[in-house]
Image (tube, rainbow, N blue to C red):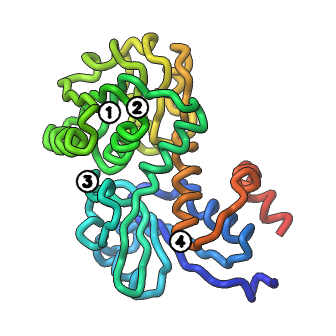
Amino acid sequence: MRASEAPRIRLGLIGDNIARSQSPRLHRLAGRMCGLGVSYASLIPADLEMDFDAVFERCRAEGFRGINITYPYKETVLDKVKVDDPAVRALGACNTILFEPDGARGHNTDSSGFASAFLAAFGNVSPGRVAMAGAGGVGKAIAFALGRLGASHLALIDPDQSKSEALATSLTAHFPDLEVSRPETLAEAVDSADGLINCTPIGMVGHDGNVFDGLDLRHSRWAFDAVYTPVETRFLAAARTAKAEILSGYELFFHQGVQAFRLFTGQEPDEAALRAAMLVPEHSEAGRA
């Protein structure tokens, strides 16, 4: 089938700091592998001189099959979609939206994607006691994944106490065997933590830093950073020096992206081939086209 004859699927990503996102490339490559003509637009509301609501409605009106949602809109989008999965309703954030004939439906491949990435990296072991910075959209998704993975304790730290309180309430209702605490500082949680997680924007391009800076990370056996631009953040570098096993934000990005592609298209890309293709520099890929 020639490229011009391939079924066309229009997708996009709405977020504020997505200039370096690899989502467009992942979905286009996956589409090519499955014989689909996928377009994937990066939609930054401020650059479009529109608010989030207007960008969302534009995607619906212009025939997008679906969109991904990233920071800071994963919670904002909830009042615009129907969510069939009770766990996603409980966690209160969506990152993948399908435009169906009967309306927009919300999913959360951040949560399922993290669970897949964790199992692929560490095997079928409990996350143990976890200290997590950030209780926003991605934090909610990761917290619910930790509940499904059998974590024993989760310490939630967020400057916005209302966010950590609401997430703790939802987790306790959904996972009665998961002990949830809300210490005032990360330092209180780190000493007894098996796992450390950053679910804040700190460390990403434009938000340099390390939310665990200055803390003793030597007691933790694993660490995860939801940030993947850059892949090697200052937090992960510090955790690696402390001999923790590392799960990068790129792994979450890849697993959630593949799961979103399945929802958008109903197709199953070859994950190994897609992972390899993503490692090829874009200019080299263009040179072979």
Between disc 2 and disc 3, the foreground one is 3
Query: Residue 213 location, x and y as percent?
Result: 38, 21
Residue shown at 46% from the left, 11% from the top:
218
Cα distance in 3D space between marks 2 and 3: 21 Å
Instruction: Say which amino acid is labelled 4.
Output: Phe
Q: Nearer the viewer, mark 4 or mark 1?
A: 4
Residue that mark 2 sits on:
197
Q: Residues within 10 Å of mark 4 (few under 14, many from 20)?
A: many
Q: Position of residue 8 (x, y in %)?
A: 63, 83
Query: What residue is at 28 percent from the left and 17 percent from the top?
Result: 187
Which mark, by number, is residue 267? none
Left or right of 74 on screen, residue 149 = right
Quadrant of the frame with the C terminus: bottom right
Q: Is residue 162 visible in the rendered structure shown here?
A: yes
Q: Quadrant of residue 265?
A: bottom right
| Mark 4 and mark 3: Cα distance apart in space | 23 Å
Q: Which residue is mark 3?
A: 90
Q: Earlier in the sequence, mark 4 or mark 3?
A: 3
The residue beneath circle 4 is 264
Please name whichever residue, 82 or 10, is drawn nearer the observer in this view of the structure.
Answer: 82
Mark 2 surroundings within 10 Å by alpha-carbon count, few (fewer than 14), some (14 through 19), many (20 or more):
many
Marks 4 and 2, the one that precedes in the sequence? 2
Which residue is tagged 1?
133
Sooner in the amino-acid sequence: mark 4 or mark 1: 1
Q: Kindly report the distance in space between the C-alpha atoms of the residues bearing marks 1 and 3.
A: 20 Å
Depth check, front residue: 220 or 47? 220
Q: Are marks 2 and 1 in contact (CB under 8 Å)?
A: yes
Residue, x 43% and y 64% (percent of image)? 96
